[in-house]
Image: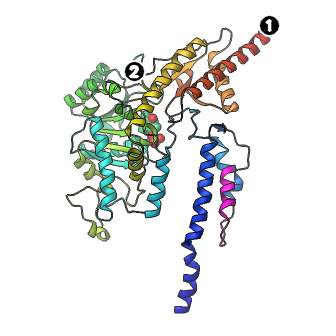
Amino acid sequence: MIEKIKALEHIARQLEPQPDTRKQWNDSVQTYADDFLDNLTKSKVYQTEQVNINDLAQLPITDAPKDLNDLLYLMKEHLDHTGINPASGYHLGYIPGGGVFPSALGDYLAAITNRYAGVYFASPGSVRMENHLIRWMCKMIGYPDSALGNLASGGSIANLTAIVTAREQFKIKSRDIENIVIYLTEQVHHCVNKAIRIAGLKEAIVRYVPIDSQFRMQANLLQEMIQADVKDGFQPFLVVGSAGTTDTGAIDPLEEIGKICAKYNLWFHVDAAYGGFFMLVDHLKPKFKGIELSDSLAIDPHKGLFLSYGIGAVLIKNVKAQYEAHHYMANYMQDALPDNIELSPADLSPELTKHFRGLRMWLSLHLLGLAPFKAALEEKILLCHYFYEKVQELGFIVGPFPNLSVMIFRYIPESEDANTFNQQIAKGMQDEGTVFLSTTTIGNIFWLRLAVLCFRTHLTEINHCLSLLEEFKNTLLERQSVKVG
Ligand SMILES: *Cc1c(COP(=O)(O)O)cnc(C)c1O
C-alpha cells in the first residue's frame, strides 16, 4: 500500500508547481495581461464571431498537461476577439464598469490564499473585512450602524436576497401569496421580476405604478393604489423603487415612497445597482434624498466602483430579518456557531462556501484611494451631459435630460420609419465595432442608448462615438435620398 500511495503522491504532486514553474506561469500570464491592457484602445470593442469558438470548447480534457502559452493563445483568439469587450472605454452600452487593475490583484490573492470567507470562525479576518465594506456602503446610504447585508455575485442576487428577506419578515405563507401586492414600475430592472418568481412569489399581485415623463414612479398614484388594495381586502407588501434605472437613469421619488411605505407598513426595497455609487460624489447626494428610508437596497460595485464582474451588494437595515431568512444550522457546522462578534455571510445569504470577493474591493479602494473613483463618477455624468448637447447638434432628438450617466436618443428622418432608421444605425455601429452602444424600446419607440460608466471612457471616446453617429446617420440619409430621387 505504501508503494501505491507513494506512486500516486508522485503524480499528485504535479498539482503543486515548483517555484521556477510558478514564475514562468506568472510571467506568461502577466505578459498576456499587459498585452491586453496596452492594446485596449486599438482593439475593437465589439466583434461578431469570426473564429470557430468550438476550438475552445472542444479542446479535449486529457490526462496529460498542456502548455500554458498554447492555452493563452486559444484564449486570446477565441475569447478576446469575440463579443463585447467590457474592459474597453468604448463600451457605452448596457451598464459598463471596466474592471480596475487592483481588482484583479485582489482576486489573485483571494484565490491563492483561498480563505474561507463564508464563516467568521473559519476566517475572522475576511468576514470582518467584508462586513466592514458593507458597513461603509450602509453609511454612504444613511443606514444606521446596526444595518448590514452581504456581498453577492451581482445585483440580481442582491435583489433576490432582499426580496426573500422581506417575504420572511412579513411571514408570508404560500396560502397568502395570491393576496399580497407588490408595487413597481415598468422601468424596474427585469431581474426584480425574476427574483419575485424565484422567491416563490409568482402568484402575488404585481402592480405597475404609472411613471411620469421622466420615467419616475408617480408616488401619489402609488398611494391611491395601496389604498384601493387595502379597501379590497388585499395585503400590500412590497414596493420596489429604482435609484437609477437601467434605461434612463431615472431615480424614483424615494422620500415620498419611503413615507408611504412607513405609513402603510410595507417593505421598501430600492434597486440602486447602477446608480448607488454616485452618492460618493457630495453634490449628487441630494438626488438620492429619502434612500435611507428604504428597508433594503441593491448596489453593484462591479458597476459604479468599476470592479471586475462578480460583486454586487445587498444592504439590509434590519439585519435580524436577513439572518432569520437565511441562517441554518447543520451538525457538521457545530464548531461554527454564530457568535456575537461578527455575523457570517453564510448566515445572511444562500451561499456557504463562497468567493472571497471582498478582497478585490478592499484592495482597490485602499490602493487607489477614493478621490479617483469620485472624480470618475462625476466625469461620467458630465460626459453624458456633453453627449446630450452634442448629439442634438447632430440633429438627433433626446429623451429626458440625463439624471445620471445614461440617456436615450434617436434620429427622426423625414421620409422613413424612425424605428427602422435607428435600428439600422444601431446595427451599423455594431458591425463597425469601434464603439458599442445598446438600444431599448420604451412604449413601442426604439431608442439608441448611451451608458457612460466604464472608468476608461473619457472625452476622446465620446467624441469618437459622436463622429461615428454622424457618419452613419448621413450615410443612411444619403441612401434614402438616392432611393427617393
Ligand atoms: C445591472 C442592473 C441589475 C442587475 O445586476 P447584475 O449585477 O447584472 O446581476 C439590476 N438592477 C439595475 C438597475 C441594474 O442596472
User: Which residue in the structure is indicated by mark 2?
Assistant: 211
Name the residue nearer the viewer: 305 or 179: 305
Q: What residue type is labelled 2?
A: Ile
Q: Horizontally, is 477 left or right of 23 in the view?
A: right
The residue type indicated by label 1 comes to Gly
Q: Which of marks 1 and 2 is nearer the N terminus?
A: 2
Q: Ligand 1 falls in which quarter? A: top left
Question: Residue 202 appears in which quarter of the rendering?
Answer: top left
SS for dot 1: loop
Count neighbours of disc 2 (C-alpha within 10 A) and say few if under 14, some if 14 to 19, many if 20 or more.
Answer: some
Say if 315 sits above or below 279 in the image. Answer: below
How many residues crowd around disc 1 within 10 Å: few (fewer than 14), some, or many (20 or more)? few
Judging from the image, what secondary structure is the residue with disc 2 in?
A: loop
Does residue 100 belong to the magenta stretch? no
CA distance separating discs 1 and 2: 43 Å
Q: What stretch is highlighted in magenta?
A: 60-76
Q: Position of residue 289 (x, y in %)?
A: 28, 26
In front of the other: 146 or 326:
146
Residue at image position (36%, 42%) is: 201
User: Which residue is identified by label 1?
Assistant: 485
Q: Is residue 297 left or right of residue 198?
A: left
Q: State the residue at coordinates (45%, 42%).
A: 302
| Foreground of the two, 307 or 436 | 307
Q: Can residue 1 be seen in this view?
A: no
* In the image, the residue with mark 1 has its CB under 8 Å from the nearest atom of ligand 1: no
Vertical arrangement, residue 192 with respect to residue 218, above or below: below
Q: In which quarter of the image is the C terminus?
A: top right
Q: Position of residue 348 (x, y in %)?
A: 31, 52
Residue 109, quarter of the rendered image: bottom left
Which residue shows up at 55% across the image and 92% down it? Answer: 3
